[in-house]
Structures are given as structure tokens and as C-alpha cells.
Image: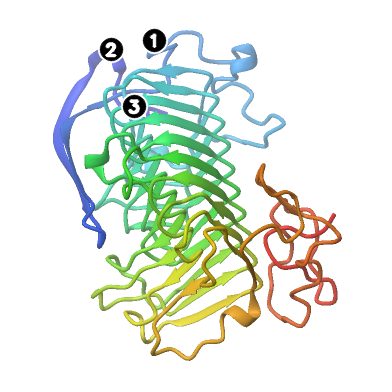
Amino acid sequence: MKTINSMSTLLLLLTLLLGYTSCDDELVDETHEEEVVDPGEGDNGDEEDNEGEGDNGNEGDNEGENGDGDRPIIEGQTFTEQMIIDGEENNGLIIRNCTFENTGDHGIIIKNVNDVLIQNCTFRNLKYTAIRFLADCESNNVIIEDNEIYNIEANGIHGAETHYNTIIRNNRIHDVALVPENGSHGMYFYGMDFLIEGNTVYNVGVEEGKGSGINVRTCGTIARNKVHNTHKDGISYSIDHPGYNGTLLIENNVVYSNPRNNIRIMGGANESKIGKAIVRFNTVISDNTNTPISLATGDLPDTEFEVYGNILINAGGSNKYIGYSSSHELEFESKNLTATGDIGFVDYEGRDLRITSASEANNFAVGLTAYPKDDFINLDVREENNLDAGAFMVN
């Protein structure tokens, strides 16, 4: 399979203006030359001895323990030029155990392609975004998992509207959004029906008010992520892309030490909104007097909100835990465990936010009938008669 043109004959394709604007006055204009690179060749592009190369496993014996079948594989290589994945001939491509560094550009650009797996790779020291789903292109079922992304000037991962059913799972993203003018985030995603699960996101942004951990603009699921020490929100939704009346589910996350709001749902003028937002069984700590959860219910009058089963700590001493419009008569706080300090965590000061058997969270949520089937660590099964508040079940 020829994924892209040979690296030995680097072709200049075109200058792309990659821009995005949010309802938070975030603007990025990325104007630069993109080089088309064949990633399947040598250390950086030499077509030699690619079959059956021992531990790297480049395109030989694809039906191994991973069950990859006849899928094309790029494995164990280092790239210092950005990779563009484009066209149905690249459907099913696996990129595994590779390093993308010092490209002076993006790491990987995804255009019109389906069923791609990017797994156990390292992305570092990049001028723009590590993995960029390009606007005005389409993809379906791209999986990004078990990667480490750091020292990135723009977003860790950025996905545009027409990229569907993307799974972003078990990645470690830190020290990203390093140029404040970019208005970037750990993840900035507005494709449809995404699953963002099990990621650790921290040290996002370098200037107060710029750089959220996970920022989405449409419907999907955000579950079992740990997000802390950003310079803006931990997990946030903004309305400036179509929501198609879908559901945004935020559950089983651990979110703390984010200066604005740890979980924030923002409104705006977009006519195509999400139809429902469910925020449940998260453990959230605000280090200041800002509410741990903020909901723009006044700007989203037709959106249904469900907020329950969470642990909400306002360590700044305020007795406000959920911000929402006074025009909404919603009894949110009665369905969540609220406090200004330790409610029986394993190590509150060290931010080990598992709960002990003596915790106030133990069985706090008994009586609720809708809940995640398991907890943050994806091991302890929740049951209706043994239902703890927050992201963790008592061990």
C-alpha cells in the first residue's frame, strides 16, 4: 500500500489555512506548507527490508497476537516530517510504536480515511497539533489510543465536524497549548458521536484563561478521564458547532485544579444545539470560589440537563457548587454530594481521590436509577443497592 508519496521525493501540495474560532474568542490561523510524506519507509523513509523485521513487525506477519489480519501496518519508526493520511487506499491503516518529533508542523493529519488506528506512539516537540482531523474532510472510526503527547505548541488532538465515531482512549496528554495566541487545548474536538475515555490530561496552556483540558463542541461521551492543572476549564462544551439535538454524557471523570470551572457547559447563539447534557458520577474539586460545575442553562433553554451522583468540593470555601440560571428551578445540588473539604478520600491533599469505606460518598447515591455500569478504574461494578457518589466505588 502506498499511503502517501515517497519521502525521497518530497512534494509540496499546497498551503492550507487551518483556522478555528470558538465562542470563547479563541482564534488560530495556521498557515504553512504541508509536505506529503510516505511513512512506511525505513527510519525516515527508505524502502528497504520492510517485511518481517523482528520486533518492529513492519508489514510482515500481520496476523499476529494483535489480530491485525491484512491491515497495513507502520511500526517502530521515527518521523521528523508530518504525515498526511488521505484516501480510501489507506483505510484500515495501523500506526503503532512510532515517534513524531521536531516536524516544525503537525504530527499526523487525517483527511478522508476510515478505520485508522494510531496506537502507542509518541508525539513531542511539535509546532502545531499532534493529531489533526482536517476540516472539510471526512473520517469514520479512527481510534487514537495509548499514545503520549507533550511539548506541543497547539492542541494535543484537534478534530473537525465531519469526522465521525472517533475514539480517543487511554492517552497521556500534557504540556500542550504552549503558545497562548493559538487558543489551543489538550483536546479540541467537534466531530460527531465521539468517545473520549480514560485519558490523562494536565499542564495545558501557559497563560491564565487560555487552555482547557478537554474542549468539545458537539455530542458524544467523555468518561473516566483525569484532567487537572490546566489554565482554563477542565472539561468544557461550547455551542459554536452543530449539536444536532444529540446527547453529551460526562461521567466517571476526576477533575481538579482548573482555574475557571472544572466542568463547564457554555451556551451561545448557534441554532443547532445538543438536546441533553448528562453530568453524573464525577469527582470534581474547585481550588477557588468558582463553582465546580457551571451550566449555561439560560442560554440553552431547550436543552435538558441532568446532574447527579457527583462529588463536588469547593475548596475555596464557597457554598455554591453548581452554577446555573436562576430561571431554572432545578434541584441539582440535592442529588450530589457537596462539601468544602475532605469527605473521606484516600489522600485528599495528595489528590488520591478514591474513597474509603468511611467516606460520606459510600452509598450516597443509592436511590438513583440511572448510572454508569462501572467506575473510574473500570473494574468495580455499580449496583443500584450499592451506589457510591463520585467517580470511584469503595474497593
Residue highlighted by disc 2: 8
Where does label 1 land, which residue?
46
Residue 249 in picture, x, y percent from top left: 53, 68
Q: Quadrant of residue 83?
A: top left
Q: Are marks 1 and 2 in contact (CB under 8 Å)?
A: yes
Q: Residue 148 versus residue 202: which sits nearer the camera?
A: 202
Q: Which quarter of the rendered picture does the C terminus lie within? A: bottom right
Disc 3 versus disc 1: nearer the observer: 3
- Which labelled disc corresponds to residue 126? 3
Q: Is residue 166 above or below residue 241?
A: above
**Residue type at the position of mark 2:** Ser
The correct choice, above or below, for 253 with respect to 19 in the image is below
SS for callout 2: helix
Q: Residue at x 49, y 67 (%)?
A: 293
Q: Which quadrant would residue 101 be assigned to in this image?
A: top left
Q: Measure how far apart labels 1 and 2 are at the Cα level.
A: 8 Å
Residue positioned most to the front: 317
